[in-house]
Amino acid sequence: MKRFLSLVLALVMVCVCTTALADIKVSNVKVEIDAALKEYAAEYSKTAGFNVTVESVGGGADYSGSLKAALQAGNMPDIFVIEGMGGYNVWKDYILDVSDTEFAKNTSVGFMVEGKCYGFPVAIEGFGLAYNKDLLAKAEIDPATLTTYSALKAAFEKLDGMKAELGIDAVVSIATSVSGGMTWVTGNQNFSTYLSCGLPYGDMTIIDMMREGKVDTERLTEYATYVDLLFNYADQEILVNGNYDQNVNAFATGKTVFCHQGNWIDPNLAAFENCPPMGFIGEPFTDKQEISGLMVAAPSWYVVNAQSPNKDEAVKFLEDMVATEAGQDYMVNKAGMVPAFANVALEPSGDLSVDVMKASAKGDIYSWGFGYMPDNFGMQNLGPIFELLAQDAIDVPTFVEMVTAEFANIPALLAAAQ
């Protein structure tokens, strides 16, 4: 009997220990780092005393909708992502104050509300028009001169006339397809050009107008004309029907001279043999001023679920990412990201990430603005308008009218989210 009771007690202890082992769920929105993040989480789990699992939902998918579905199912992740104040307003009851963490003390771009830090910056990212250095050199075009709309238009015209000589299919690779999941590029990233490009870093002039439901019609028209230029010289199949991989692959294989994406494509480019050297120019949407800087910011933030029983373990996981050699190696070398933390000395090797770091160091940067829009507004409300312009279903004036009409709904959407 004693032997039997000892066996039962041992089994009970095993069950208790197994039950006590936390399983931390991380919800990730950056699909391009999915493999690297899962590898890091698996290695971390081996010695952490708890398991970390990663689920990636992004690339145009409805991330906000997936979180709401998880909430309804009672399956909220322990760590999830917000992309700005719109997301914070929706999820603020589920977001932990992390002001006292070491990672918060080591970054200047944590997500802050009223002096408190609530978000871990996933990275520093920048975007503009990535370009193939070899092809521009062959066409005898100096990228440093492409700082105005007229200069860019002239360059596009020249390159378009040299397709056969350069071996390209089109001048630009850019995609707009709603079904292809590309509205995060158009309605969020690209639209930030209207909201912030050419303004002093952190200037809220256009953003504040937007949040009041107003537009600067002259600026919006300039911006829409620039977008139309990109579309007119794009690979039309990729523009209308392409997805992320097609968008990037055409550029990586030298089939286009330019690509509208950010430095997050560096790991994709590195996967191609004999990938040519790349660089960035800005988004020269106007002739009123020269645009040389890149759009640089923290694109999103990890936040810890304040209502999770595993919130302490979740914080430890994020702390490890910043404080340890393995975590820093993941961020910089494996995921190819520009770190947002002062204690990380590693630097990325990708051409585009190097350009982002150089621009940031010089202060030749403009802030992003899409995070101040209502949650999911850029992708759901604005993204389809870009697609219509790409399909030639509307013209530039109609694009401006439709965006203006969508802006009129913003105050009510913001109020409803409070």
Image (cartoon, grey):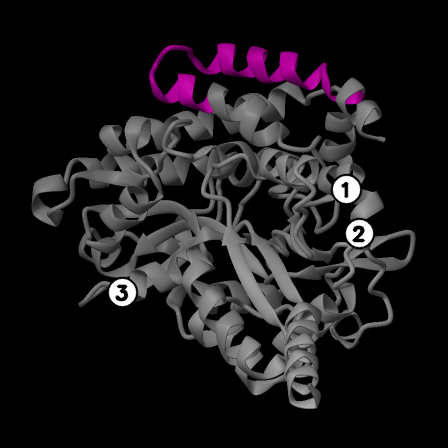
Local secondary structure at mark 1: helix
Q: Nearer the viewer, residue 336 or 320?
A: 320
Q: Contact (CB < 8 A) between labels 1 and 2?
A: yes
Q: Residue at x 37, y 64 (%)?
A: 267
Q: Which residues fall within the magenta stretch?
A: 386-411
Q: CA distance from mark 2 to mark 3?
A: 36 Å
Specify the farthest residue to the right: 114
Drawn side of residue 300 relative to residue 285, left or right: right
Residue 160: mark in rendering: none
Drawn side of residue 390 relative to residue 46, left or right: left
Q: Contact (CB < 8 A) between labels 2 and 3?
A: no
The quadrant in which residue 50 appears is bottom right
Q: In the rendered image of this protein, does residue 52 appear above or below residue 132? A: below
What's under tag 1, amino acid-wise? Answer: Trp
Q: Residues within 10 Å of mark 3 (few under 14, many from 20)?
A: few
* Earlier sequence position, callout 2 versus callout 3: 2
Q: Which residue is mark 2?
A: 95
Q: Which residue is mark 1?
A: 91
Q: Residue at x 39, y 56 (%)?
A: 265
Q: Nearer the viewer, residue 279 or 68?
A: 68
Q: Which residue is mark 3?
A: 271
What's under tag 3, amino acid-wise? Answer: Ala
